Amino acid sequence: MAVSAAALRLFPSATRFVVLCGPGNNGGDGYVAAAALAESGASLAVFAPGDVGKLKGDAARARATYAGEVHAIETYEPRTGDVVIDALFGAGLVRDLPKAVQEAISRVDDRCLPVIAVDLPSGIDGRSGAVRGASFTATHTVTFMAAKPGHLLLPGRTHCGSLEVFDIGIPDRLVRSRAGDLRINTPAVWQQHARGLDPATHKFKRGHLVVFSGPQTSTGAARLSAMAGLNAGAGLVTLASPPEALAANAAHLTAVMLKEIGKAGDLAEWLKDRRLGAFVLGPGFGVGKKAREFALMLCGRALVLDADAVTAFMERRTELFDRIAAEGGQVVMTPHEGEFARLFPEIAADTALSKIEKALAAAKLSHAVILYKGSDTVVAAPSGRAVVNANAPPWLATAGSGDVLTGIIGAHLAQGMPAFEAAAAAVWRHGEAGMRAGRGTTAETLVENIAPLPE
Ligand SMILES: NC(=O)C1=CN([C@@H]2O[C@H](COP(=O)(O)OP(=O)(O)OC[C@H]3O[C@@H](n4cnc5c(N)ncnc54)[C@H](OP(=O)(O)O)[C@@H]3O)[C@@H](O)[C@H]2O)[C@@H](O)CC1
Ligand SMILES: [K+]
């Protein structure tokens, strides 16, 4: 009923609704929608692959509600004015689409017809968002009870069009028990940890964030992180700079403080100051021994390892993972796809795993919270909790955008948020900042558009 209502609402001037019904319960939903559309008086045709007489159980009962004829899908010739209702495969898709279905999809694509998908665009794997052989690209998708990973993860998300989640009365507790520890990243996930910023509070209580600068010729990335950290609510931000980059950094900083930290010995001494609440290491830092030394010294603290600091451990990751496990700090790593593959090659190469499962496996292996970047960023904790982010506009993919994200995570850690919540809240605020900044944003305008944490 929801599907037929969406079809009539969105396409009131359709000359014909074409319902494509598959062999399982997704097809069953299609027959029920067809019956409702027929009752409304709409012009209608139904096509199915294979032998409709073989339908079983609920799907066979659903078929019986539709009195009209069902034609072989091979005979469907798309016409201008058709609106396709794709009820071929949904949650039960287990292998690549059959040839007859792939051909029907390409005929519909050739005509650029609008498609309403039932549950999922056929061809999209609901668990991973992968395309199995081919897939419809829908204008609108009607799913039931809850969005599934395939609606959010790429490439699935780009095939769904607008997503409508229709409540068919399954109790929330059952939906949650199936979803386990997986959720969409919304403020509800982390809001209880987002301490309201009391204007009367002492600046040290709002947290002191340290960002490590790279050498003289690559200082900008760390400054972006530092500025983002300050705008995201850290009370104090210090840029720790090697001596040769002090002048370059000093020329660009006002509210952010500057401290000379050259060698590991300087850092060891400085770390005695327990007011230093959180650390960001990686943006523009350089890949090498120094990155590894610094990272290993910080594993017991609240720490974001990004970019170069992740890559630096490509050949020696066990050293890092063991140290994180032993020191038990609040550690977040923020790899994009390339960095992820460098640090977790066997997980990255496992094509059976979804992005969520990959992030979870990496979190478990590394003992750190993994923020696996992309337009479908996943945050996963070693405990098995995970969120998929959904508020990022495409124009967030701009130079320096990741450094801004890292700074926001650092600000949250400095304010005492646990690593998982700090990372999830940061991705969300980063997405919101992108929306506020609008198309054509640069990393600098992104920093200016970081809004206060929602109360
Ligand atoms: N569960 C619920 O509570 C609710 C479920 N609902 C609805 O049910 C849908 C799930 O139904 P489903 O489980 O029957 O799966 P579905 O997507 O119809 O496909 C299974 C059929 O396809 C076949 N098949 C699979 N892959 C194939 C391939 N590549 N090529 C060829 N065949 C392939 C597979 O055959 P087999 O693998 O057994 O050979 C089987 O016959 C869900 O998406 C939603 O629309 C809603 O009404 C709300 C409540
Ligand atoms: K479908």
Image (tube, rainbow, N blue to C red):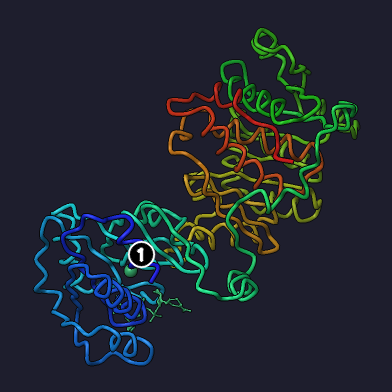
| Image quadrant occupied by the N terminus | bottom left
Residue toward you, 95 or 169: 169
Instruction: Count numbered badges in the picture.
Output: 1
Residue toward you, 268 or 69: 69
| Image quadrant occupied by the C terminus | top right
Establish if 394 lies above or below 100. Answer: above
Secondary structure, mark 1, is: helix
Give the residue displayed 50% in from the left and 60% down from the top: 346
Pinpoint residue 189: horizontal percent, then vertical percent. Answer: 68, 54
Establish if 39 lies above or below 78. Answer: below
Give the residue displayed 68% in from the left and 46% down from the top: 332
In the picture, measured across the screen, residue 286 lies left or right of residue 352, that is right
Ligand 1 shows up in the quarter that is bottom left
In the picture, measured across the screen, residue 237 lies left or right of residue 354, that is right
Q: Residue 23 falls in which quadrant of the image?
A: bottom left
Pinpoint residue 101: horizontal percent, then vertical percent. Answer: 20, 71
Residue type, numbered disc 1: Ala
Establish if 92 lies above or below 62. Answer: above
Pinpoint residue 299: horizontal percent, then vertical percent. Answer: 77, 45
Give the residue displayed 42% in from the left and 56% down from the top: 163
Establish if 135 lies above or below 451. Answer: below
In the picture, measured across the screen, residue 337 lies left or right of residue 318, that is left
Pinpoint residue 150: horizontal percent, then vertical percent. Answer: 44, 62
Q: Is mark 1 within 8 Å of ligand 1?
A: no
Q: Residue 380 falls in which quadrant of the image?
A: bottom right
Residue toward you, 215 or 397: 397
Q: Residue beneath label 1, please?
A: 5
In the picture, measured across the screen, residue 252 lies left or right of residue 31, that is right
Give the residue displayed 70% in from the left and 32% down from the top: 452
| Mark 1 crowdedness (10 Å alpha carbons): few <14, some 14-19, many ≥20 | some
